[in-house]
Image (cartoon, rainbow, N blue to C red):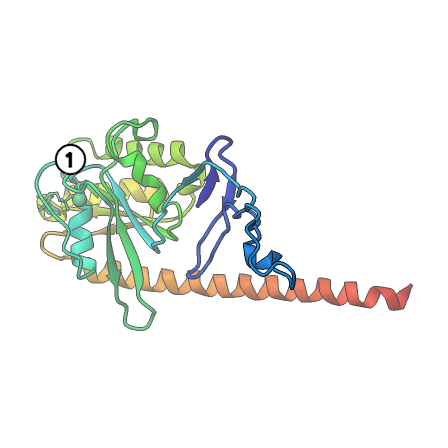
Amino acid sequence: MIKDSESGRVLADLCDEGDTYVAARGGKGGMGNPHFSSSTNRTPRFATKGKLGDEHWLRIELKLIADIGLVGLPNAGKSTLLSQLSAANPKIAPYPFTTLEPQLGVLNFKHQEPCIIADIPGLVEGAHEGVGLGHTFLRHVERTRILLHVIDISSETVSEDFQIIENELRAYQADLVDRTQFLVLNKKDLLEPEELQKLEGYFADLGQQTLTISGLTGEGIHGVKAVLESTIDDLRHEDELAARASQESTQKTLETVLRKPEQD
Ligand SMILES: Nc1nc2c(ncn2[C@@H]2O[C@H](COP(=O)(O)OP(=O)(O)OP(=O)(O)O)[C@@H](O)[C@H]2O)c(=O)[nH]1
Ligand SMILES: [Mg+2]
């Protein structure tokens, strides 16, 4: 994304491969001496200078284009989940802020085209105001279709943990929380079945779609893949319908415009 550095106005958004944008045009070229040669002056000793080109200060932002984004508090198990879903080999360790830069993985499906998952560094309370690392990286999930909010259910403060991330997403960009989102209840191996059931009930009452897994043992990973595959299928189908509808409406507008002179 290319923005004017002073006003912040978006000048271009290069989303597709091969997209180009001329940010500053070069000045008109000068005329070299051959231009002035004539039958009487075969080797003119003068030339004209070119004009100055445009100058702008720009801000260029790189936003990863991934289909699925992993968000959550540090140490929740995001990188572990990425390593289970894809062939990516991110660093995993039992302390916060193991992941310092976004990591990408490719998720292959049985019947669908593969999709890209982005694991971003852990978010903390106040991330949208610049606390921790996360806020810098939230822009990388802006363009994802699905968010997986990974939560460590062995934490003493699960509901607060959940709320912190929800608040951060909302504070960063309100429509991030409205995105297709699944709450991944991770580390089920550390909980008794009754405790687990209670938590699942709690989040279901909040209207959350939950997926319970253990990133460590791999339990529930198949379920996550299946849900992602069918969700991606639905979203791609919606995209196709939207594209067709917009094509039809352009066609109709064109037809109306073309028919108008006849009526006049
Ligand atoms: N018992 C258990 N431990 C897990 C599970 N998933 C992840 N862990 C452990 O939790 C710790 C943190 O995992 P990571 O995948 O590095 O967590 P993260 O969310 O990527 O952390 P940051 O990169 O710091 O944000 C590691 O020690 C993992 O082995 C799980 O399902 N069960
Ligand atoms: Mg990590």
Query: Type of residue at label 1?
Result: Ser
Residue 113 at x, y percent in the picture: 34, 69
- Label 1 near ligand 1 (CB < 8 Å): no
Residue at image point 75% right, 67% down: 255
Residue at image point 40% right, 49% down: 143
Residue 15 at x, y percent in the picture: 44, 55
Residue at image point 54% right, 63% down: 243
Quarter occupied by the C terminus: bottom right
Q: Nearer the viewer, residue 16 or 256?
A: 16
State which quadrant residue 67 falls in. Answer: bottom left
Badge 1, how many Cα within 10 Å: few under 14, some, many 20+?
A: few
In this view, the residue farthest toward the right is 264
Give the residue at mark 1.
155
In this rendering, the answer to whether 4 lies above or below 245 is above
Is 93 situated left or right of 210 in this image?
left
Residue at image point 62% right, 58% down: 41
Count of picture labels: 1
Residue 193 at x, y percent in the picture: 13, 47
Tell me if I can see residue 162 in this picture. no
Q: Nearer the viewer, residue 231 or 41?
A: 41
In this rendering, the answer to whether 41 lies above or below 167 is below
State which quadrant residue 114 falls in. Answer: bottom left
Residue 147 at x, y percent in the picture: 33, 48
State which quadrant residue 34 falls in. Answer: bottom right
Tell me if I can see residue 16 in this picture. yes
Q: Nearer the viewer, residue 238 or 6?
A: 6
Identify the element where label 1 is drawn. Answer: loop
Q: Quadrant of ligand 2?
A: top left
